[in-house]
Amino acid sequence: MILLSIILILIFFIANIMMLLSILLSKKSFMDREKCSPFECGFDPKSSARIPFSLHFFLITVIFLIFDVEIALIFPIIFTFKLVNLLNWIKISFFFIIILLLGLYHEWNQNMLNWTN
């Protein structure tokens, strides 16, 4: 028990010494102040908020979020393969994939996937 407490105290001191050394030896300058500021969509937070925003950038972001959520919804379908019978699982999977493909087709027809607009 004493050995364990000595080891824990030693680990505590080594961790604190390493943190102190990293603080003392780090190179900080006036130019690093920009790294600590919030960064949002390529805009400078210290400038005027009334600048034009690319609507196409927003649409690409929404498409990314939709397909990101889609991946989160596909994983449970994979895990339910053993729980339901094969025919129902295939129907549910195809229905879900058809909805996603129709959404992708609609985005393609609206030229949302072309960056050159």
Image (cartoon, rainbow, N blue to C red):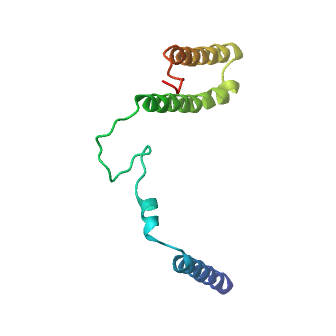
Quarter containing the N terminus:
bottom right
Task: Residue at 58%, 83% (x, y): give it.
Answer: 13
Q: Nearer the viewer, residue 35 or 104?
A: 35
**Side of 87 where 13 appears, left or right:** left
User: How far across and how far down the image is residue 117, in percent?
Assistant: 48, 24
Task: Residue at 43%, 60% (x, y): give it.
Answer: 34
- Vertical order, 49 against 68 (above or below): below
User: How far across and how far down the image is residue 17, in percent?
Assistant: 57, 82
Q: Nearer the viewer, residue 77 or 48?
A: 48
Q: Nearer the viewer, residue 105 or 28?
A: 28
**Figure disc tally:** 0
User: How far across and how far down the image is residue 40, in percent?
Assistant: 42, 47
- Vertical order, 49 against 101 (above or below): below
Task: Residue at 52%, 27% (x, y): give it.
Answer: 115
User: How far across and how far down the image is residue 99, in percent?
Assistant: 55, 16
- Vertical order, 18 against 99 (above or below): below
Quadrant in which residue 81 is drawn: top right
Residue extending furthest toward the front: 116
